[in-house]
Amino acid sequence: MNKIIVLLIFPIIIHSKILSVIEINRIGMRTSRHFKNDLIDKFYGRIMNLTPHGLNQLKNLGESIRKKYIEENNFLKYNYDSNQFKIYSSETQRSIFSSEGFINGLYPENLISIKYQNDYLNLISSDTVPFFYEKEFFDNQKLIELNVLNLKKNHIISSGYCLYNGKILDKDIEDNNKEKNFDISNNEINNAINDLSKYLNITLNHFSDISIEHELRLLSDLYFVYKNHFNYQKNNLKTISFNTEIIMKKNMLNYFYPNKGKITENIKIASTGFLKFIFNQFKEEKEEFENNNSKNKFTVFSAHDISIIRLLEILFDKDSLNSYINNSIFNDDYFNILIPEYAYSLIFELNFDDKKNFFYVKIYVNGNLLDVKFNGIENYESEGGKIYLDKFLELIENNINESEFDKLDCVNAKSENDIIIYDDI
């Protein structure tokens, strides 16, 4: 007797809908103040500018976002819609052209127009077009508006450069928080400096007014640039010792996370611009969705490493952050989350589950879900890293210091190109 086998195929039903996305990216790789002459020549002597590799990094990031949010999830429209997609940049060359690289990956068919202090620059005729752009990049028609924020008028991206009580805010955070994660002796630091100087064939002795900790950090940043972007390790017979790499990591973690997970008021002030924006966009999108008027907003910021670090300090639970700091010494996966590399991506994604009828937020770092214990959140869905929206907004609102943020003096602050604090390699 023949048996008839009936296969029942049921469609996979997805109950979640993406409602809103905010992405904060670090710029692509740039030239250093301290590149050797051969590298300066390679990049036409353009110090602190985006490199061809940096442009490619952001273009690749834009392509990955296009794949996820246009091709796979149909969140963004296939064609650019100015009511849906917004992108903002600080006013440095490296930040502006990082944004352009990202746009070129996300919407490759569109021309870009820069909006700066309410004036538009058409890049076809602009002399700021970097030397490594191909002409055909501009042979398009529809303009995508790139909003360049002037530090003195809008400091959401770069508030740490503003003056607070007469001092640069980020510098004040550095000076007033000396509780270190790791004890490192001067002898260990000097040994690491010597090892790195030989490896890189460079010396920073012309700096007379910086600490040895700062000198080691400068050399460490250069080391990671050489190692990760020039395959220096493969082409150079010299190597650094295991101890040097450990001391490098400890020194960088001491420098960028001096508070052992404590959120000071200055950290809140430095983060308030981004926190307010996230709070308002997600709250507004929730209300619009409930009123059947959802717009699927996607906002991108081209920012700097310290801006991202300040947000991570706000997001992480104290014990969770300290655990990541300690694990970072021997595990690059942890280290690369806490110390943003070039083209680092931090994404906040608002979703709605129509089966369980609740809003929730997911946070992604470099495309991977950040599933940790978050600051002040005790009861949230840990499976899949879902954070109930009301809990997430409570976390954000509790760390906004709007009154002090509004007191920041950005009119008398130096431009980002003139300030050397964290982002100074």
Image (cartoon, rainbow, N blue to C red):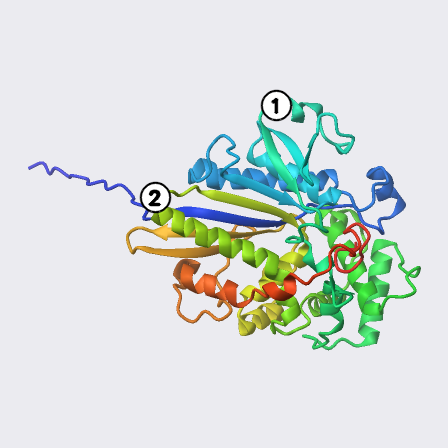
- The percent coordinates of residue 144 (x first, y second) are 59, 32
Q: Is residue 193 above or below residue 364?
A: below
- The percent coordinates of residue 305 (x first, y second) are 67, 55
Q: Earlier in the sequence, mark 2 or mark 1?
A: 1
Judge by depth and name the residue closer to the eye, 54 or 90.
90
The three-letter amino acid code for the residue at tag 1 is Asn
Judge by depth and name the residue closer to the eye, 309 or 279.
279
- The percent coordinates of residue 175 (x first, y second) are 76, 71
* Residue where numbered disc 2 is placed: 292
The three-letter amino acid code for the residue at tag 2 is Asn
Q: In the drawing, what numbered circle is on residue 140?
A: 1
Looking at this view, name the residue that lies furthest to the left: 1
Rendered residue at 71%/24% (across/down): 135
Mark 2 or 1: the one toward you = 2
- The percent coordinates of residue 89 (x first, y second) are 66, 45
**Residue 107, image quadrant:** top right
**Residue 338, image quadrant:** bottom right
Q: Could you say whether the residue bearing mark 1 is in a helix, strand or loop? A: loop
Q: Could you say whether the residue bearing mark 2 is in a helix, strand or loop? A: loop
Residues marked 2 and 1 touching at CB (< 8 Å): no
Judge left or right: residue 241 versus residue 77.
Answer: right
**Residue 115, image quadrant:** top right
Judge by depth and name the residue closer to the eye, 273 or 240.
273
Rendered residue at 84%/49% (across/down): 35
Q: In the drawing, what numbered circle is on residue 389?
A: none
Decide if residue 59 is in sight here. Answer: no
Rounded to the nearest angstrom, the CA distance separating label 2 from label 1 is 34 Å
